[in-house]
Amino acid sequence: MKYLRKSFICLILLFLVGVMIPTKTEAAAASTLRVVNATYPTTLKKGQAFTIGGIVKCNYKINEIAFVIRSTDLSKLYCKTIVRNPKNPYTIGTAVDNAMKFDSLAVGTYRYMIYAKDASGTSKFILDKTFSVTSTGQAASSTLRIVGATYPTTLKVGETFHLEGIVKCNYAIKQIGFAIRSSDKSQLYYKTVVNNPKNPYTLSSTVNNAMKFSGLKAGNYRYMIYAKDASGTSKYILDKTFSVTATGKPPTGGDSTLRIVSPTYPTVLEVGQSFTLSGTIKSNYSLKQVAAAIRSEDLSILYDKVVVNNPKNPYMIGTVIDNAIEFDQLKAGTYRYILCAKDTSGATKNVVDKTFTVEKGASTLKIVNPGYPVSIAQGTDFKFEGTITSNYNVVSLAFTIIDRTTDTTVRKKNIFQNATSYQIGTEVNNAMNVEDLPVGSYKYVAAARDESGTRLTLINRNFTIVETENSQYAIWPLSQVYITQGAYDSYSHQTENAFDCVIQPITGAKAFAPFDGRVIAAESTWGTIWFQSDQKVRYADGTYDYMTVVFMHGKNATSLLGRSYRQGEAFYVLGGTGPSGPNTYDTHLHVEVYKGKASPAGTIISSTAAWSYRGNILPNKALYVKKSKTSIINNYGYSFQSIS
């Protein structure tokens, strides 16, 4: 099952017969899902309609296309329509155009979006455009600006400076000019112009190389950024004075202005909650160091710390500090967030020193991976499972079985503890003692309380104990349990509820019937059979129902069609059958279990139809290991129920 040729053959069979055949995952062509020649509005007058158009294309079948008008923050939906299984290519036409009621929109700003899915599994927004509706139909005012800009304050003669910033606008940007001038603007020292830049535009190395701060003599200057956009707006979006001195200190000396602007810091968090730090540290001197830390309230314990040496001035707190200070790892308690900075004047200052608390918040009391019965054969044991967890200590638990006919409690177990989790195991299973329950209808209830005071009924499930006199236990079909690949594992098992198994020695080995049954379907390409029980059987998880076991890669699969075999009778020859014949793969048995009948009344079904009945229960939850017939060599981490 671990060879790539299998995927190629499976895809051919899928195309021919339209069924799901087990495959290996192979690299497929990348999806080209897109829209071309799309029309969309930019500015509309209130009440004005707009005709949308475009063609959606893909190299795969298109499953769905959705068209929406939403608020700019996506919180509100105004118009929506979905086209399922459209033609490919799909031309946007009247039906969609009528559904997008641009003329009904109030004055405001919106997003027109197209979302699509294709048969490769690709799903994405293929168009996302912002537009505005105004009372006049005139465009909104320009928002031409720069954000996150860095600029010098005082430099030492010969010192370089790294410029940063992002120029943004709600219109296309036509031009950005960068210049260093004398303080009275009379003399130009350096200049560079970027025409028709991207929007937003991030200052690049080209700009940095052109602004040669290191070539300036001692004196006073202005660093200026001038921009134009498509609305006709043109303005200086930055105009900052700075000085160049022999010492790198301000011309007049003076005290340090070390400070932080627009800092963020937490006040109250819940356990596991993150927080985004920001702020800009500035000084009239060069910055030497910025350090951030989380400490205990009395400063005695350090939890997190990060140091940035020789940062830019101004220094914008970003991912370096934000990623290092892990608020989401803190336990409940009180802490201090401290941000300390130093500059070349010798000034050292805690520019932020804030106390905050971390609280547990609302209880997260829950159960994960619960196991409970549905229908159990009388006299069969059942293992209840599940892990009960909370962010608070789970202090009391109650497990109960109620007779639904008499509404009386027939089993009960109370447990008291002080821990954040409890794993259901032997303690509960011994108390529930399901194997001694008589035939009847019951209810299993599991409840818990944590120290926050939260009380929850975590499980409330009905189940039955059924009469099963002389019923068979479904047994593992090989002389060894030796699993080489598990369910939902790698390669072909990524989507398959199946086990791959071997036995030693394997040459000439046969699988035997797990119960009295009949081969109701078979196919030759993969050497597959569907073996269905004649009667209801006992499952390893306590279920009492019909069972269909799927064996794959046998040499003699099609010759077995329609034949009946008794439990334990060896009949299926292991051979590694695949599209290229026997031994296409390592000789092994692929096992799946379908809970129930695949074929009503045991009729023969076609191999095409049989592929619809795949594993819907883990094999170890369905099949017992008979100690006298089978030894466990490698269980691959799966637990098995054993019978004598």
Image (spheres, rainbow, N blue to C red):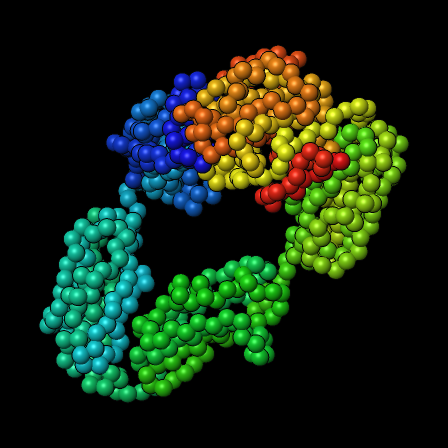
Q: Is residue 47 visible?
A: no
In this image, 398 relative to 36: left or right? right
Is residue 466 or residue 68 the one in the foreground?
A: 466
Is residue 30 or residue 236 the one in the foreground?
A: 30
In this image, 128 relative to 239: left or right? right
Residue 600 in percent (x, y) is at 64, 14
State the residue at coordinates (60%, 17%).
519
Residue 202 in percent (x, y) is at 26, 57
Q: Where, by quadrant of the figure, is residue 53 drawn? A: top left
Is residue 401 or residue 252 the one in the foreground?
A: 401
Is residue 365 or residue 11 the one in the foreground?
A: 11
State the residue at coordinates (32%, 83%).
344
Q: Where, by quadrant of the figure, is residue 127 drawn? A: top left
State the residue at coordinates (28%, 87%).
253
In this image, 592 relative to 450: left or right? left
Q: Is residue 534 visible?
A: yes
Residue 174 in percent (x, y) is at 19, 51
Q: Where, by quadrant of the figure, is residue 182 drawn? A: bottom left
